[in-house]
Amino acid sequence: MPWPKGVNTPTEMNSTSANFSLTNIEIEKNELLHYLEKAKKKEQLHPHPFFGKLNRKEWGRLIYKHLDHHLKQFSSM
């Protein structure tokens, strides 16, 4: 099942309201890979803003779906 379109982004994750700087794709890619590695090593992950507490498998599936959604979104631009 694909990620649903039009789902509101939580404020703390919204690139417009959180004022993220997206200027260099290589820097962003390396930062993403760094955070994924960091998450893999953590013993316990934070609750998700929408879904609450998730186990590692659920987090992995959610991260996969989310990244897939954005990669498809940007590949069509």
Image (tube, rainbow, N blue to C red):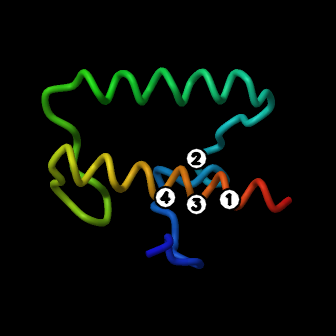
Helix, strand or loop at disc 1? Answer: helix
Marks 1 and 2, how far apart at CA: 23 Å
All told, the count of numbered labels is 4
Which residue was labeled with disc 2? 18
Task: Give the distance between the C-alpha atoms of the residues marked 2 and 3, in whole angstroms.
Answer: 20 Å
What kind of residue is marked 1?
Lys
Q: Which residue is mark 1?
A: 72
Is 37 located above or below residue 1 in the figure?
A: above
Q: Upstream in the sequence, badge 1 or badge 2?
A: 2
Q: CA distance from mark 4 to mark 3?
A: 19 Å
* Tag in front: 1 or 2: 1
Could you tell me the amino acid type at mark 2?
Ala
The amino acid at mark 3 is His
Report the residue at 44% width, 27% height from top. Answer: 35
- Gap between marks 3 and 1, in whole Å? 5 Å
Circle 4 residue: 11
Above or below for 42 versus 4: above
